[in-house]
Image (cartoon, rainbow, N blue to C red):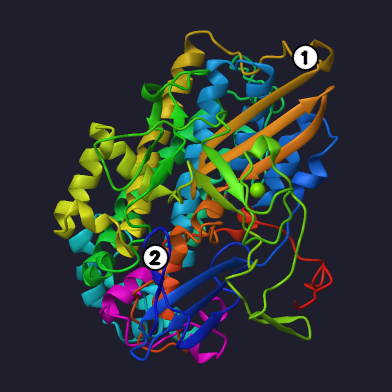
Amino acid sequence: MSTTATPNGFGLDDSGRRVIIDPVTRIEGHLRLEVNVDADNVVRNAISAGTMWRGLEVILQGRDPRDAWAFVQRICGVCTGTHALASVRAVEDALRIPIPQNANLIRNIMQLTLYVHDHLVHFYHLHALDWVDVLSALKADPAATSVLAQSISSWPKSSPGYFKDMRDRLAAFVGSGQLGPFRNGYWGHPAYKLPPEANLLAVAHYIEALDFQREIVKIHAILGGKNPHPHWLVGGVPSAINVHNSGAVGALNIERLNMIAEIARKARDFIAQVYVPDLLLIAAHYKEWTQWGAGLSPRNLMSYGEFPRLANDVSAANFGLPRGVILGGDLTRLHEVDLHDPSQIQEFVTHSWYKYPSENQGLHPWDGVTECDFRVGAKGRIENERLLRLDESAKYSYCKAPRYRGEAVEVGPLARLVIGYAAGRTDIKDLVDGALRKLEIPLSALFSTLGRTAARGLEAQWCADRLVAAVEELVANIRNGDVNTANADKWEPSTWPAAAKGAGFAEAPRGALGHWIVIEKGRIANYQCVVPTTWNASPRDPQGNIGSMEASLLGLPMSDPARPLEVLRVIHSFDPCLACATHLYGPDGQSIARVEVV
Ligand code: NFE
Ligand code: MG
């Protein structure tokens, strides 16, 4: 085989068989993967393509900046609220609007709740079935499952009777021929390694987690009115506090605060006693997965930082999860990241279905353009509006290619924990080192499919602990007499400058999220979102450098390319969300642009 080397050092070979997976399921949004496999079924070329157009940036033009959050959070219902957070921060940055400390605490509680919910749903409902063979669970011995469960956790639902009921329910489900959520799995695939009892335990917790995820989002409903898509506010949060009148409609009172505290404690217990023990149990059976899915090499990782302790302070020390960039795997040096610096973050569209004024020149998001340009290259094929093959030498994705100082970077829980580790945060170091010790794997093994999945679970634990603490802090602040939740000083557009620019950062569950806004005469003149999955699912840039999801697939051995379970494991470990990364189909899924093959 003839291999071409990319500038970032990956050998790509486009001969061999082309395997196409479209759509990838158990993700949010629409992702297409094309990989070439050699005669030994090892992946030698990888293409990740966002196949939707969103265009919310276009819808926002000319609107009131104070309304932007309500539009942009509709980008996605999974990382719900996080786009709204980035949006209100962008407007506050542009107009120099400080927020009260209660608003900072409530925003942190909203975001911590989101992380716990989102990571939990990802592990059990989007990723677990890549590792757990549901049909094998039918062969489990309930008594042995009970012994296994009690050996790893003190979670009370662990009796032989409980697991027998669970197995019987599953058997009835399977016997009915309607597998429901378990349909179309690759059951019996040789890559499944768990004993039947571990499979039954995981299936039981899949069901329990479905119930629990409904519980935790009540925090969003109390503080933000509903979930998904809770309410936000430029200048603070829309949650009025009234501890003296428990009958005040909609106000945050002692009873509501107690309820939030109670749910937070339950979340901490569920993560500590169910999610993390299950994660470690499953990981121990799949340690060979520390060899695959490493992603970018050398490692480039980025985090914008999240969970500011004090309001209106973006200094490194103020973030619970620190801000920074690691380049070339050098953990001894954290580079700064500044969303205002036009030379740091740019997006490229050479291989994306967008048109820029100059095809190979990157644009900082303040100057970003969202103009559709759908066409496939000479090797691409479309028949009857069905995309049969992409041409990666041409345009091939609705994801743009974002770069930090020209480099592709990985974002997400793995990046955040490694950056926290490199920054010397002892809470993060203890958490990571403890898990590495239990799994008997080195720090370097984190750069893998298994490491990425483990990092998400550990981060969920960190967040659940912080959630309990953040609620206590809020109660203490209120007890001290501070009931302010919003700053209305600059509410009137007449108080704004004629022109202003801002950048709003957030760490979304899947990684670094930035919103850039340009305000002119009180209206939005330009708005751009660069989201976590755009970083991870990035297509090639003008130099031919590939992104982290594409890189993570190279060298991956598959046992049966027609049942690409291994590819799903690698890709699901990023928890991709193409809805965030890109855009929307027309109502019937028809293509919205006229397609010509050139
Ligand atoms: Ni739709 Fe999102 C997150 C954002 S994208 S899920 O987390 O922002 O990758
Ligand atoms: Mg964008």
Residue 186 seen from this side: yes
Query: Which quadrant is home to the N terminus?
Result: bottom left
| Residue at the image position 61 percent from the left and 34 percent from the top | 85
Question: Tag 1: Cα neighbours inside 10 Å, few (<14), some, or many (≥20)?
Answer: few
Looking at the picture, how far across and down is residue 578, in whole percent?
60, 60
In this rendering, the answer to whether 95 lies above or below 403 is above
Looking at the picture, how far across and down is residue 256, in whole percent?
56, 30
- SS at circle 2: helix
- Residues 372 and 189: in front is 372
Q: Residue furthest top?
A: 481
In this rendering, the answer to whether 66 lies above or below 580 is above
Q: Is residue 74 left or right of residue 26?
A: right
Q: Is 186 one of the magenta-colored residues?
A: yes
The answer to which image quadrant residue 23 occupies is: bottom right
Q: Is residue 455 left or right of residue 241?
A: left
| Residue at the image position 54 percent from the left and 19 percent from the top | 102
Label 1 sits on residue? 497
